[in-house]
């Protein structure tokens, strides 16, 4: 046990208490952030004259050494230390002696851990932005290549009206555009430096909080010391954005699973992104999509968990807040993995374009267009709806599509039908005639694709 706070205690901590309280097993991943923050703090302390320049230089070199040795494995981060902060301080003192004891001047682990978490989350926001951007690039290619790949659009999972594959993918593109925007918003809101808030009430040392903030690439310092050490909104916001990304990936996964099934056969997943069965030799399962769908639950769990942890905590820091780490780390790792794997899966899948088109043709997805055809011939819409309803019934009995009937059969149901009906209700016409903004026709689709290209080009990843 290497504790920072033994002075006022006369007894050793109970081992179970020590283990229960310690966070080193999971907060060791904050080592780079802890070192970075400590270097900025030492630099600032020297700038305001609290430590000397020699002490600063010795601290900076010591901290760099600890990071290098921990990274190479020469220095092991063990459970002998309560948390990553204790590990760094103890090792610094071992290395450089008394100057190391001055690093924690004007600082508490409360503002230190708040800083480490912000730095970590900030870096992970950028990592997530990168992955969402990669996914959007794949979606953009699928959109550009499939303007005339026709498929049924569904409502209630019943075939409804034909769309293009490009249009269907475009719906997900919109979702991930919003996800990217959410990440950017979170970055801007979290990018304030809590270091200097002390335990909860600032300090009497003349700390230059603007300098610390700017050394660490923050927009500025946070403005209330109590809020600074007890705010975890940025974790909650990120978990919320992560939960939304997973909800999108999960819906998409569900469609991939359906499309890849024998019954749909709209796509075939690449062998590299599928798995087999130990007993059934014929199987090729969409495990990646299923796992993405499944892992959505644990990311939602992290959000609910942290919201619940935070809801009863009085100001300012309380140990409950240590619970922010494992679930936030796990959720971010999960989302990053899911984005990468999902992207690879859809970039390599094969489209069964003929099967999609046949499915659209065999599902009366042109029934609305057939009714609209009659309207154009002067039939009131409600009457046209009834006529096409009877026509569909006739087709179901005959097991045929509307456009497979002869003109005579059509005219027997309604005399307004003429030869031009066949062109009016072809799959191609049904899609290509829908040209209002946001519709699947080629005019709005090309406009959206051009807009997306400019958008993707304009995006910048926030600095970690
Ligand atoms: N391991 C702690 C956490 O993650 C660090 C802050 C400890 N502060 C304290 N007053 N015990 O929250």
Image: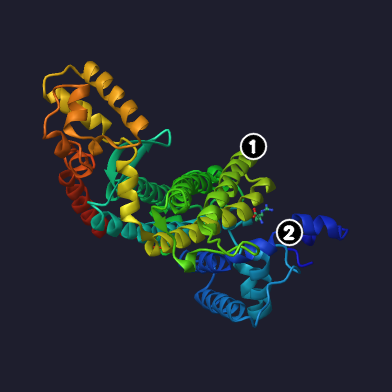
Report the side of 463 relative to 311 (left or right).
Answer: left
**Residue 130 in the image, given as x and y percentages of width and height:** 39, 61
Q: Residue furthest right?
A: 11
Secondary structure of the residue carrying tag 1 is loop
> Looking at the figure, which quarter contains the N terminus?
bottom right
**Residue 171 in the image, given as x and y percentages of width and height:** 33, 44
The one of 107 and 137 positioned closer to us in this rendering = 137
Disc 1 beta carbon < 8 A from ligand 1?
Answer: no
Q: Residues within 10 Å of mark 2 (few under 14, many from 20)?
A: some
Whether tag 1 and tag 2 are in contact, CB under 8 A, the answer is no
How much space separates mark 1 and mark 2, taking CA atoms?
Answer: 22 Å
Report the side of 368 relative to 100 (left or right).
Answer: left
Ligand 1 located in image quadrant: bottom right
Q: Of marks 1 and 2, which one's residue comes earlier in the chain?
A: 2
What residue do we see at 80% from left, 58% from top?
18
In this orientation, does residue 218 appear? no
Q: Is residue 202 above or below residue 10?
A: above
Residue highlighted by disc 2: 22
Foreground disc of the pair 1, 2: 2
**Residue 430 in the image, given as x and y percentages of width and height:** 21, 39
Secondary structure of the residue carrying tag 2 is loop
Q: Which mark is residue 314?
A: 1
Q: Residues within 10 Å of mark 1 (few under 14, many from 20)?
A: few
What residue do we see at 55% from left, 64% from top?
275
Q: Which mark is residue 46?
A: none
* Colouring rule applied to residues: rainbow
Number of numbered labels in the structure image: 2
> Looking at the figure, which quarter contains the C terminus?
bottom left
**Residue 71 in the image, given as x and y percentages of width and height:** 58, 77
């Amino acid at each position: 046990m290497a504790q920072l706070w033994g002075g006022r205690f006369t007894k050793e901590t109970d081992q179970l208490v020590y283990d229960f309280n310690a966070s080193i097993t999971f907060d060791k991943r904050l080592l780079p952030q802890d070192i970075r923050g400590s270097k900025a703090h030492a630099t600032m302390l020297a700038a305001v004259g609290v430590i000397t320049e020699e002490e600063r230089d010795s601290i900076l070199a010591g901290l760099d050494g600890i990071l290098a040795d921990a990274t190479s494995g020469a220095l092991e981060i063990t459970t002998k230390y309560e948390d990553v902060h204790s590990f760094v301080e103890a090792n610094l003192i071992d290395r450089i002696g008394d100057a190391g004891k001055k690093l924690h001047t004007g600082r508490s682990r409360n503002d230190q851990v708040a800083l480490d978490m912000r730095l970590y989350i900030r870096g992970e926001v950028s990592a997530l932005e990168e992955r969402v951007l990669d996914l959007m690039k794949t979606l953009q290619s699928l959109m550009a290549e499939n303007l005339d790949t026709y498929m049924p659009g569904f409502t209630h999972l019943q075939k409804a009206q034909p769309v293009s594959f490009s249009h269907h993918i475009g719906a997900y593109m919109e979702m991930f555009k919003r996800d990217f925007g959410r990440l950017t918003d979170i970055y801007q809101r979290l990018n304030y430096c809590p270091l200097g808030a002390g335990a909860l009430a600032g300090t009497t040392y003349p700390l230059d909080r603007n300098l610390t903030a700017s050394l660490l690439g923050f927009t500025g310092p946070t403005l209330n010391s109590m809020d600074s050490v007890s705010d975890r909104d940025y974790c909650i916001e990120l978990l919320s954005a992560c939960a939304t990304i997973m909800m999108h990936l999960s819906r998409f996964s569900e469609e991939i699973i359906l499309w890849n099934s024998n019954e749909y056969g709209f796509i075939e997943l690449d062998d590299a992104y599928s798995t087999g069965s130990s007993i059934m030799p014929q199987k090729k399962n969409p495990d990646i999509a299923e796992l993405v769908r499944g892992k959505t639950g644990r990311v939602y769990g992290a959000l609910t968990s942290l919201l619940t942890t935070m809801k009863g905590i009085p100001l300012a820091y309380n140990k409950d807040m240590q619970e922010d780490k494992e679930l936030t780390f796990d959720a971010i790792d999960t989302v990053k993995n899911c984005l990468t794997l999902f992207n690879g899966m859809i970039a390599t899948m094969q489209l069964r374009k003929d099967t999609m088109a046949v499915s659209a043709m065999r599902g009366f997805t042109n029934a609305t267009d057939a009714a609209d055809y009659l309207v154009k011939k002067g039939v009131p819409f409600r009457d046209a709806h009834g006529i096409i309803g009877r026509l569909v019934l006739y087709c179901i009995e005959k097991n045929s599509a509307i456009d497979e009937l002869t003109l005579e059969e059509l005219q027997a149901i309604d005399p307004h039908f003429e030869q031009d009906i066949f062109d009016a209700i072809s799959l191609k016409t049904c899609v290509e005639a829908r040209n209002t903004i946001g519709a699947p026709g080629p005019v709005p689709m090309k406009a959206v694709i051009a807009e997306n290209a400019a958008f993707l080009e304009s995006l910048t990843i926030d600095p970690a």
